[in-house]
Amino acid sequence: MLLEFIGGLVTNSLALLSDSGHMLSDVAALALSLMALWFARKPPSLNKTYGFYRAEILAALFNGLTLFVIAGLIIWEAAERFVSPPTVAGGPMLTIAAIGLAANLLSAWFLTRFGDVKANVNVRSAYLHVLGDAIGSVGAIAAGLLMMAFSWYIADPIISVLVALLILKSAWGVVKQTMHILMEGTPATVDAEQIRRALQQIEGVRDVHDLHVWTITSGLDALSCHLLIDDPSESQRVLQQAVHLIERRFNILHTTIQVETDRLQHGRIQV
């Protein structure tokens, strides 16, 4: 980050400066992700009965939003350079960008090797920050080659805008996923209607209602529902069968199931 910032000032390269600015956010993003992982390990309390797992989701959301801000700043600065492209020292810029690319690829390798960048949205947001930096370094290398070969200095802001657009695409994916989790949306890997049909096939179950499936944090889903049965004496058998079914077929371990009969009367449920 420091190398690209100083190099950007010396070579007058927006591509390097924007990439170093992105790296600065990554330092904060990676630190925030690490802190969230540590915080999520704290045990539940009477005040926080689900524990602190959502800290990971909040960190991912914050990281995604910072990517939007960074991309906007890059595009704003690039717009000014389109009008009057400054001279950029292509050779030094190329060298510094190559070093930055190596550092980013090494960081990305560590995250994919020792972290779950697919299932854990917090680690994924950190990975996307690093990957965005790697793309920025590739763009800076491409801009340096074009300027050295053709003195085409407008390549610097053009590459910067392209990198910013790629950052926006990645950021939208993270923000969309975290918002879905915070809105208690059904996990993408779960079909709620399929769960309903499976539960209704249990012998003795007449109806399944008030079915909710949501994500507490990445890789930890929860389910709650009501099962209407005919014979009260069969309630424990039906409950045990339902719990095992949801565990085996849908990999949901945190279940809250209310078994009830026609005699049970409760108030109107809003959701």
Image: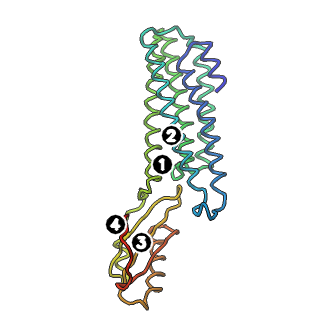
Secondary structure of the residue carrying tag 2 is helix
Q: x%, y% of residue 21? A: 58, 26
Distance between the Cα atoms at labels 2 and 1? 9 Å
Residue 156 is tagged as: none
Label located before the other in sequence (1 or 3): 1
Please tell me whether mark 1 or mark 4 is closer to you in this view: 1
Tag 2: amino acid: Gly
Distance between the Cα atoms at labels 3 and 4? 12 Å
Which residue has dot 1 on it? 178
Distance between the Cα atoms at labels 4 and 2? 31 Å
Q: Residue 196's image quarter?
A: bottom left
Label located before the other in sequence (2 or 3): 2
Q: x%, y% of residue 47? A: 61, 61
Label located before the other in sequence (2 or 1): 2
Which residue has dot 3 on it? 225
Tag 4: amino acid: Glu
Label located before the other in sequence (1 or 4): 1
Q: Are marks 1 and 4 in contact (CB under 8 Å)?
A: no
Q: Which residue is painted at 55% across and 32% down in the image? A: 134
